[in-house]
Image (spheres, rainbow, N blue to C red):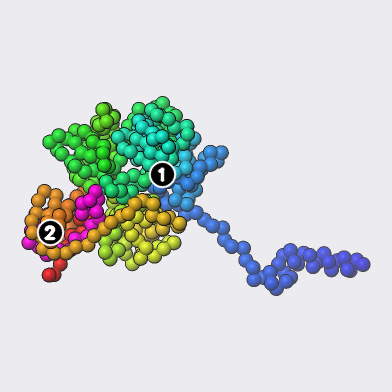
Amino acid sequence: MKKLLLAVVIGVALSGCGGGGGSDESKSTPPPVVDIKPTAAQGTIKSVDYDYNTINVNGHSYKVEQVKYGSQVLPITSLKPDMMVEVSMLSRSGAVVSVEPTMVGVVTTISADRKTFVVNGVTLSFALDRHIELHDWVMVSSLPQATADGLGYKVLSVVKIEQEDVAGQYEIEGRLSGLDQNTQTFKLGATTKVFFTPYIIEDNAKLMNGQWVEVKGHMINDEFHASEVEVETYDDFDNDHEIEGIVTWVNSDKSQFELNARGRFIVNALTRFEDGTKARLAAGELVEVTAFNGVAKEIEFERGFGGETGNWREFDREGYVTSVGDEHFRMAGETFYVDAYTEFEDFLTLETLHGQYVEVEGVIINGKKVAREIEREDD
């Protein structure tokens, strides 16, 4: 009996150590999944855990050290799903989360069905929360959207502002058009007229049609009077930065693309694609781009995204340029426009286009063919 009991004990011990049973030897414990976070990320909040002070952005979980809007420090309870933010890793202790809304302002109109509303002179489509009422201050997060009127806003979230220090700070982002240096005005989106003065432009940047700009100031009689204008680009996102956004243009050989109408990235042989291939890269796709010095290291397509940002229309033409004007030229009976993001190849400039045989690639914005790439062609 003792021998039998001893044999059972030894057998159990061997099986616990993996010494018995050949089938168990083939099984191995998979290594733990390590979340390798980029040093900085820009995108929408997928979820917030207020108990553990964490948020999920672009599929990564971040421990929140501080929340800011401009220079104003906010509580983590200010963060809500679908808000646009920028996350910067400080150390292992946590990250700084900067709230990056498209608009901050007062709700001046709400439709009867609560599916459209007006902020900063812009009519937006979104099913408003029942707690948001007329004259409430809100933060609006959005992505670029193709509309019949040009480049519009695909609203992701509308958050009522509770902090007294934030309410009162008007802000709006958008594509700059209709720049008039004589009247010192320009237009954002389809309707908002902005008044500015040169000394309020950040970094002494030169304003040009087509730029994506962030404007802060005040709404006066349905007009936005700017106190600060900043040109938004991805030039500062050089090393190991991940950006979520809408592809707003792709050239014909898919070697370059524009993201969120404010920056261009290069695609090369080392660019990796996730949840799709290079063939899927097209205007209107929602992607996450990890970039290094302007080169896309990785492009991840958003699974299940149905292209809810409008019908992006691109064009490709070639022919002789018959005339050149101010920010536009004529070719084969059509008018083409240039803006801040038009790229001239082969040492061409707008002034030297007349008489040249060129290929023009671009995107249609507000019914206008806006050139993104112009290069000399053999006729």
- Is residue 72 visible in the rendered structure shown here? no
| Quadrant of the snapshot with the N terminus | bottom right
Q: Is residue 94 left or right of residue 331?
A: right
What residue occupies the far right of the structure in this picture?
Answer: 1
Q: Tell me which segment is drawn in magenta.
A: 350-370
Residue pictured at 15% horizontal, 55% vertical? 335
Residue at image position (36%, 51%) is: 309
Residue tagged 1: 156
**Residue 344 or 331: which is nearer the viewer?**
331
Residue 176, position in %: x, y? 23, 43
Q: Position of residue 198 (x, y in %)?
A: 18, 35
Q: Nearer the viewer, mark 2 or mark 1?
A: 2
Where residue 163 sits, quadrant-wise, is: top left
Instruction: Label 2, secondary structure: give it.
Output: loop
Residue at 19 percent across and 50 percent down: it is 339
| Cα–Cα span, label 2 and label 1 | 40 Å
**Pointer 2 residue:** 333
What amino acid is at disc 2? Answer: Gly
- Magenta-drawn stretch contains 369: yes
Mark number, residue 4: none
The image quadrant of residue 69 is top left
Q: Label 1 crowding class (10 Å Cα cut-off): few <14, some 14-19, many 20+?
A: some
> Which of the two residues, 194 or 128, is positioned nearer the viewer here?
128
- Residue appearing at x 22%, y 51% in the figure: 367
Q: Secondary structure at mark 1?
A: strand
Which tag, 2 or 1, sits closer to the chain's start? 1
